[in-house]
Image (cartoon, rainbow, N blue to C red):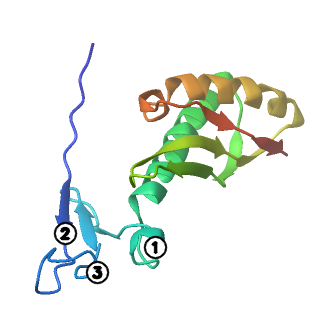
Amino acid sequence: MKLHKYQSKVEWTGNQGSGTSGYRDYERAHSIKVNGKAEILASSDPSFRGDPEKYNPEELFLASLSSCHMLWVLHLASVEGVIIKSYKDYAEGTMEEAKDGSGRFTEVILKPEITVTEERMIAKLNSIHQRANTMCFIANSCNFEVKHEATGKV
């Protein structure tokens, strides 16, 4: 089996002078950096005192699932002779928060809208999505099923 390794740097930038001396005494702001790439400014979800102007881990997780699925769909479509002209996904995820404050995603539904060049190609899209679900590295790392409700048009 071939192994791939990844590195990132996450740095908290929300110290307002007194560190984490109290729950309301610090910002949840942080940056995400991978060498040679643009920095991502992030925070926690606004429900957890985060900055609504910044990405939060839950949004980035959802985007990772959507992106991975899309890349597999594009690859499999090219192998199957399906010519995709546009692909937009409006993914939705549900996270369940427990009484102790922990939580987990219980559902993700990918909702890609795909435009192909010929009507006959739309019929192949469903099998391509099913295969992409089994191939996606991120979806394979989840403890829940990643669903999809795709629509195709010419």
Kind of residue at badge 2: Trp
Q: Are marks 1 and 3 in contact (CB under 8 Å)?
A: no
Position of residue 83 in the picture relative to residue 135 (left or right): right
Q: Position of residue 36 (x, y in %)?
A: 20, 59
Given residues 90 and 98, the one toward you in this image is 98
Residue denoted by label 3: 24
> Crowding at label 3, few (<14), some or many (≥20) Cα neighbours within 10 Å?
few
Element carrying mark 3: loop
Q: Nearer the viewer, mark 1 or mark 3?
A: 3
In the rendering, at what x and y percent does residue 115 appear? Answer: 76, 47
In this view, which residue lies farthest toward the bottom? 17
Q: Secondary structure at mark 2?
A: strand
Residue 150 figure quarter: top right
Image: 27 above or below 152: below
**Going 29% across and 66% down the picture, which residue do you hit?**
38
Residue depth check, mark 1 versus mark 2: number of the one nearer the observer: 1
- The residue most toward the right is 119
x%, y% of residue 138?
44, 35
Q: Which mark is residue 12?
A: 2
Is residue 97 or residue 127 the one in the foreground?
Answer: 97
Which numbered dot is residue 46? 1
